[in-house]
């Protein structure tokens, strides 16, 4: 390959927008919307692990919150008092249920363990969205979705941000969520949990 051709390929790759930039250009937010400030060193100490860089960037730009009240993204646990609705492992009660260990792909069942899951979100259709942790670094954690339609886990080899972007663009063969309202939705709204709570305190229906 001649140098000029190689240079063109490198330039093309460098010019490709990152998933978060594409997501930010797709969603509708409040004019003064801002992300959440997180003490990531403190969160790492409390949780015993780092978080994926794409998730850190997502929280700093968008915050923990909801897409159209249909897909919620959680904030990390930074103190014991924050335990409600934060990123957490699968509960012991759920792990004791044989249905929790069902997978749509037999190869995934042989590769991954539900005990290594971290819940980062949920859908309006009562789906559970996780990272599969383990030996890989956080930036390589795949996404797994427990669909209430299938009563099984499906693995998606992409980041959290890529998963959300591809869902909104309907780039999966089928919608990965039981609630299909976000699949291919143009200009979806996003509200951080903080913004939603402030609007409710003012007597405003955030999603009207």
Image (cartoon, helix red, strand yellow):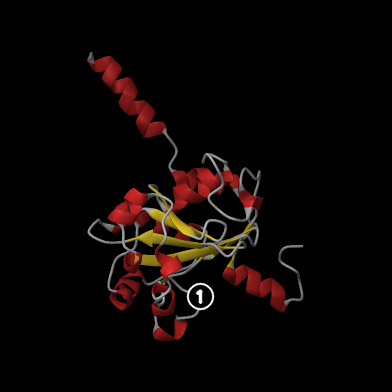
Which of the pair 190/104 is nearer the observer? 104
For residue 88, above or below residue 32: below
For residue 51, above or below residue 158: below
Which of the pair 193/147 is nearer the observer? 147
The residue at which mark 1 appears reads as 85
- Which residue does the image show at 30% across and 65% down from the upper left? 50
- Which residue does the image show at 25% across and 57% down from the upper left? 137
Residue furthest bottom as drawn: 81
Residue 16 placed where, x, y %?
A: 42, 34
Left or right: residue 114 versus residue 123 is: left
Count up the numbered dots.
1
Q: The N terminus appears in which quarter of the rendering?
A: top left
Q: Residues within 10 Å of mark 1 (few under 14, many from 20)?
A: some
For residue 16, above or below residue 102: above
* Kind of element beneath mark 1: loop
Residue 86 placed where, x, y %?
A: 46, 74
- Which residue does the image show at 32% across and 74% down from the upper left? 47
Quadrant of res 80: bottom left
Left or right: residue 118 versus residue 170 is: left
For residue 32, above or below residue 83: above
Residue 204 placed where, x, y %?
A: 76, 71
Residue 112 placed where, x, y %?
A: 31, 58
Left or right: residue 121 versus residue 89 is: right
Q: The C terminus appears in which quarter of the rendering?
A: bottom right
Which of the pair 116/70 is nearer the observer? 116
- Which residue does the image show at 56% across and 44% down from the upper left? 25
């Amino acid at each position: 390959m001649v140098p000029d051709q190689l240079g063109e390929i490198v330039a093309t790759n460098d010019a490709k927008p990152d998933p978060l930039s594409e997501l930010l250009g797709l969603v509708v937010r409040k004019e003064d919307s801002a992300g959440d400030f997180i003490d990531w060193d403190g969160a790492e100490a409390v949780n015993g692990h780092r978080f994926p860089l794409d998730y850190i960037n997502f929280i700093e730009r968008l915050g923990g919150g909801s897409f159209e009240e249909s897909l919620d993204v959680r904030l990390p646990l930074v103190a014991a008092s924050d335990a409600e609705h934060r990123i957490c492992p699968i509960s012991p009660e759920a792990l004791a249920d044989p249905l929790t260990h069902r997978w749509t792909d037999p190869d995934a069942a042989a590769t991954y363990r539900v005990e290594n899951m971290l819940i980062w979100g949920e859908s309006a259709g009562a789906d559970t969205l996780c990272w599969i942790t383990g030996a890989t670094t956080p930036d390589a954690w795949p996404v797994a979705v427990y669909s209430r339609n299938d009563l099984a886990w499906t693995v998606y080899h992409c980041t959290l941000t890529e998963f959300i972007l591809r869902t909104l663009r309907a780039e999966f063969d089928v919608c990965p969520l039981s609630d299909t309202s976000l699949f291919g939705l143009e200009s979806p709204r996003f509200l951080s949990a903080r913004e939603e709570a402030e609007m409710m305190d003012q007597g405003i229906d955030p999603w009207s």
